[in-house]
Image: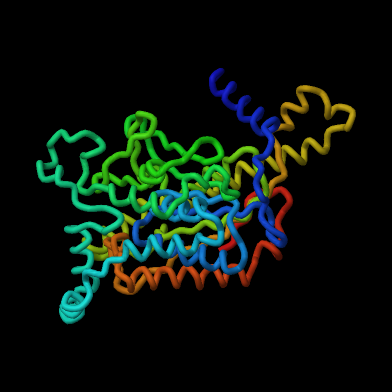
Amino acid sequence: MATRTRTLKRERDVQTQVPAPDLRIGQPGLPGQVVLVLQGGGALGAYQVGVYQALHEAGIEPDWVIGTSIGAINAALIAGNEPARRMERIEAFWSRIEQQAHAGFDRWWSSWLGLGNALANAHTVTRGVPAFFVPNAGALHGSRAALGVEQAAYYSTAPLRETLGRLVDFGYLPHSRTRLTVGAVNVCSGQMRYFDNRHEALRAEHVMASGALPPAFGAVRIDGQPYWDGGIYSNTPIEAVLDDMPRRDSLIFAVNVWHQTGPEPESIWQVMGRQKDIQFASRADNHILRQKQIHRLRHVIRELHQQIPASRRDEPKVRELASWGCGTTMHVAHLLAPRVEGEDHTKDIDFTPAGVRARRQAGYADTLRMLERAPWKTAVADPIEGVIEHL
């Protein structure tokens, strides 16, 4: 109990004493810093490309991008380049990982037999994705072979390291006005860790660790510790934004590519898809519900502090208690990727040009609609509420 009390005391000290980072706070017409939260989801990350494209074309550059897995890669492509080069670098990455092998003969057979993307996905499974991952020869020794945590995987992500080196300017990151945070989980402790360019120099391995989903990909070692994809712990890193200190007013675009709700499955095939959606949706709604409760309490504390006579507000005990309160408002704009016709539990490896294009277009259209509505401008909220959701 004493340890927990000391921890909370340190958190209050950080909240009240640490100056805010030198960040551009949003832009005129927007309620605070602009934050882009990107889930992991492999090929489903194409939806995030459309979201960013719409924001970029509207002149809205995020102050903070936080992502897991493919979301971390897209986030690095954004924050790790000057605004004028971001779309160029993002498009270069996605053009490199699109799977063209199913064209021609394979595409004709898939269409004629009603196999959808089955042959294209089979190419991905057997050959990997150039510029992203390739089969790991060590896996041929069998699942019980002691290869070491970094090699105990079906694929090698060595091509991704080279791709990131070409398309992300890691030398620019420390000076970027866009904050970058990527989530990964420590293999040994099982604890989630968010690597942040405001606190440390981020390199390609930090991004790769965030996308090292086992057993497909091996762990990535950082400062001697092995890390896996943060998605196996929490695939929706919005809690890191809402827990950030010092707190600040924010407009958070929560970009989700997995469906937390869905119809009742009727076959094993459908069960596999539904299980995957539930697993990687990662309690996003619960995170926000918890934060709504916490922010409401902070606002209540602020209001109660205003009821204390002015003559007592400077008393040390009163100031300490008041430090738990705040008046920040978090607007959460939800963007959810639609289901693409014919998709199944293999949708996250659907790197076909058609699949990538459909999801990117959906992200673009959904974001344009959200920006046109701009619900944060007209929302009338109880002043006690600190988190306002826009669906």
Q: Can you see residue 296? A: no
Query: Residue 196, percent across and down?
Result: 51, 40
Give the residue at x 66% y 62%: 376
Q: Which colour scheme appears in the figure? A: rainbow
Q: Can you see residue 101? A: yes
Report how many numbered discs are placed on residues in the image.
0
In the rendered structure, the answer to whether residue 304 lies left or right of residue 27 reads right
Query: Residue 326, percent across and down?
Result: 71, 40
Between 249 and 204, the one lying in front of the other is 204
Work out whether 81 lies above or below 219.
below
Name of the residue lying farthest toward the right: 311
Work out whether 270 lies above or below 328.
below
Give the residue at x 35% y 53%: 163
Between 14 and 23, the one lying in front of the other is 23
Query: Residue 41, percent across and down?
Result: 37, 56
Between 9 and 297, the one lying in front of the other is 9
Name of the residue lying farthest toward the top: 2
